[in-house]
């Protein structure tokens, strides 16, 4: 199968993630998209993250009615912080029957060269890039912009932020329509992000 890997903290997963995953899956003719929940992203502060078990559970709830979108906890048993190159190696070893594609927003292109083993990743993994707002095109290095393994995919330009959602929850505001109903219920029942 052709599997898109959508890496993220998903703190929490929101409707923007789901829309992008579904649109990219269709545009790139992928069989499934796996939401790879990262316990610790090397570019983000750990203290701002909810524990990975709650974040994974919210992903499970968000995609439970869609076979084409799946949760993935591959990084939970790996050393932290999580590096994409290590996760790709693990998934390729574990699932040699699948062809993996990375799914990333266009903002990733401005700092992809800073990723651990970025050239190795680019050599064997196609990256499907969906549009993100306010990307500084001039910061994208030519060797990345013109790389044959980077493919731009048409998708709606969305700017839903998990930070905005967490801030809204702390402020006592509704997050209806920003997150799936089951995710909203989970957040409320466990009093998360307060």
Image: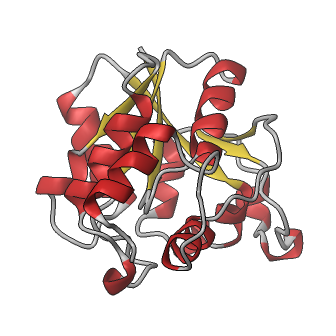
113 relative position to 194: left or right: right
80 or 14: nearer the eye?
14
Residue 70 quadrant:
top left
Q: Locate the C terminus and report the quarter of the image it occupies.
A: bottom left
Q: What residue sits 66% from the left and 30% below the top?
A: 24
Q: Is residue 46 left or right of residue 11?
A: left
Comparing 125 with 103, the one in front is 103
Numbered marks: total? 0
Which of the pair 52/124 is nearer the observer?
A: 52
Quarter of the N terminus within the rendering: top left
Q: Which residue is most to the front?
A: 172
| Residue 22 placement (x, y as % from top left) | 61, 27
The image shows residue 73 at horizontal and vertical percentages of 24, 45
**What colour scheme was applied to this rendering of the protein?**
secondary structure
Q: Residue at x 43, y 36 (%)?
A: 62
In the image: residue 135, left or right of residue 46? right
Residue 160 in the image: above or below residue 110: above
**Which residue is at a point 66% across and 39% down the rendered structure image?**
20
Image height of 143 relative to 65, above or below: below
The image position of residue 49, as x and y in percent, is: 35, 74
Rendered position, 163 above or below 48: above
Farthest residue, direction left: 77
Quarter assignment of residue 60: top left
Residue ID at (35%, 47%):
58
Residue 52 coordinates in the image, percent (x, y): 25, 60
């Amino acid at each position: 199968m052709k599997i898109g890997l959508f890496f993220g903290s998903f703190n929490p997963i929101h409707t923007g993630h789901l829309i992008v995953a579904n649109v990219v899956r269709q545009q790139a003719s992928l069989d499934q998209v796996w939401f790879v929940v990262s316990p610790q992203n090397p570019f983000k502060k750990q203290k701002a993250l909810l524990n990975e078990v709650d974040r994974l559970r919210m992903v499970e709830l968000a995609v439970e009615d869609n076979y084409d979108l799946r949760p993935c906890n591959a990084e939970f048993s790996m050393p932290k912080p999580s590096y994409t190159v290590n996760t790709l190696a693990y998934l390729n070893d574990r699932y040699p029957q699948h062809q993996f594609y990375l799914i990333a927003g266009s903002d990733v292109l401005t700092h992809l060269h800073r990723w651990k083993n970025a050239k190795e990743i680019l050599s064997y993994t196609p990256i499907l890039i969906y549009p993100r707002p306010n990307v500084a095109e001039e910061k994208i290095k030519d060797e990345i912009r013109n790389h044959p393994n980077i493919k731009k995919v048409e998708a709606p330009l969305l700017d839903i932020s998990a930070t905005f959602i967490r801030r809204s929850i702390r402020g006592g505001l509704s997050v209806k329509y920003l997150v799936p109903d089951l995710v909203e219920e989970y957040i409320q029942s466990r009093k998360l992000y307060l």
